Image (spheres, grey):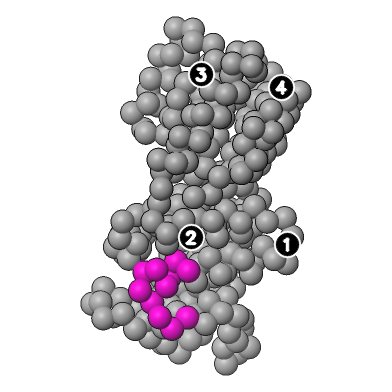
Amino acid sequence: MNRSILIIEEDEHQALSLLTALRDTMTDCDFSYASNANDIMAKIITQYYSIAIVDIQMDHSNFDGFMVMDHIINTNPYTKIIVVSDFNNESIQRISEYLTKGNILTITEKKTYQTWIPELSSLIRDYFQKDINPIAVQILEDLYAQAKNETNIHKKGRMFEEFVVGLFRQMGFIHIDTRIHDKAENEIDIIVRNDLTDPFFNKFGRYVFVECKNRPEIGFTKNDFIVFNKKVSSSNGDSNLGVVFTTGHISRAVYLEALRESEKGVKIIYLGSAEITRLIHTPNMLDEFKEIIDRQVA
């Protein structure tokens, strides 16, 4: 599985020190850190990570570690969290509410590095060894992490498209084309031939048009919707289902614009980070995809 670890610590010196110590001990893992408020929120949204080490004591920020954990859980539902706490009564009571969600890997407190680094290293190694995903899931998770964490803007889009193609192949779709131009010379990121022998998809036309936006900071905008909706609407009935995959947020203006266009026989489905990670890890990806469509069509 992908071995990316994000350290969230308000004190930058301590964050960098912990990163360096763990990296020296665990050379097969990728470590990053965030310390100030803007960087913390940006890293949570823009990066993919298997484990987050979160110090919940944030006295100099306008939010606390619990808000950080909420954002992590909403953005990357399968991320495990190592909570760093001072174990006072108030923090333990609040942490207990998160234990039932299944995201907490353990709760620890800061110690001397001589003691703490071996403990953290052992815990992380044990988790990675026990959490052995099927090969297909490992591949998809790695592709998604690489695409989301890529810094080269030109590679970023292509890598994300390759990942989305992998998702559709895993769902059972066979004929998939990328970067196709329609009759009006509009470029479609991915066109999936709707050739499954599944009654659920019969109502959606011969093809599924797919738009990929690997822009975690920007997300999917109203203008993106207008352009993509026009591409699907101009397919002469070949497709009435468009699917948007985005690593960022979907603006409220998109949903409002979608309501205005909802009577024209074209449906646009949106998958953000939470839906994408659920698809990767679900036992039956096609059924999960159907449920996502059902929830948004209803």
Q: Hey, what amino acid is under mark 4?
A: Gln
- Above or below, 293 against 21 in this view is below
* Outermost left residue: 199
Amino acid bearing label 2: Leu
Residue at mark 3: 108
Q: Name the residue under label 1.
A: 153
Q: Which mark is residue 178?
A: none
Indicate which label's residue lies in the foreground, 1 or 3: 3
Q: Give the range drawn in magenta.
A: 166-176
Residue drawn 55% across the image and 60% down it: 143
What residue is shown at x 69% (from left), y 28% (from top)?
Answer: 21
What amino acid does circle 3 point to?
Answer: Thr
Residue annotated with mark 2? 140
Mark 4 highlights which residue? Answer: 14
Q: Can residue 132 be seen at all in this image of the molecule?
A: yes
Tell whether label 4 touches label 3 (CB within 8 Å): no
Residue name at image x 23 percent, y 77 percent: 199
Q: Residues within 10 Å of mark 1 (few under 14, many from 20)?
A: few
Question: Residues under labels 1 and 4: Cα distance?
Answer: 31 Å
N-terminal of the pair, mark 1 or mark 2, is: 2
Identify which residue is drawn at 25% across, 77% down.
198
